Image (tube, rainbow, N blue to C red):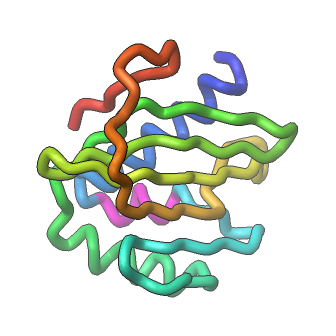
Amino acid sequence: MSELDAILFANEAFYHAFADGDSAAMEALWASQTPVCCIHPGWGAIHERDGILESWRTILADPPDICCVAPRPYLFGDAAFVICFEEIGGDYLIATNYFIREDGRWKMVHHQAGPTRFAPPVDSPQTGRSIH
């Protein structure tokens, strides 16, 4: 598996945990040795891992029907990010998911999603769709 594939796999695991309401899987995805931050749409920044995980437990108690669309990975050595669209109920958010290699595995260190007036590109070679 290439590094870009590994990053996309970590990103996919995030959206599976999100869609499935799986708090344990979400917790396993977030870095534990690196500073982290999360900004949910309409929320302020959450800077501590415990607060981030608590926010996810709240969200995952009634998870939305969400699909990751058109993920595009960027790799910088032991750090990477994915820009993607989140489809929820026919509307789109745009998201940035940052990862860092921690103990040999890609772990999330930042997630931010917010509204966009754009739809995902349909002709991009990186276009993909997660089915949940």
Q: Is residue 93 above or below residue 84?
A: below
All told, the count of numbered labels is: 0
- Location of residue 66 in the rendering, given as x and y in whole percent from the top left corner: 24, 48
Question: Magenta region: which residues?
Answer: 22-28
Within the image, what quadrant is residue 82 found in? top right
Residue at 65 percent of width and 45 percent of height: 81
Q: From what the image shows, is residue 73 above or below residue 101?
A: above
Q: What residue lies at 76% left-to-right and 52% top-to-bottom?
A: 102
32 sits left or right of 19 in the view: right
Tell whether 114 sits left or right of 88.
right
Judging depth in this view, the residue of 46 and 48 nearest the camera is 46
Q: Quadrant of the C terminus?
A: top left
Placement of 77 over or under 2, stated as above or below: below
Q: Position of residue 14 (x, y in %)?
A: 44, 49
Q: Is residue 11 magenta?
A: no
Q: Is residue 26 magenta?
A: yes
Which residue reaches farthest right?
Answer: 77
Q: Residue at x 44, y 61 (%)?
A: 113
The answer to which image quadrant residue 76 occupies is: top right
- 99 or 41, which is in the foreground? 41
Q: Main secondary structure of the magenta part?
A: helix
Identify the residue at horizontal 65%, vertical 16% (top origin). Answer: 1
Residue 53 x/y as whole percent: 46, 76
Look at the picture and state if 28 lies above or below 120. below
Image x and y of residue 54, in percent: 41, 83
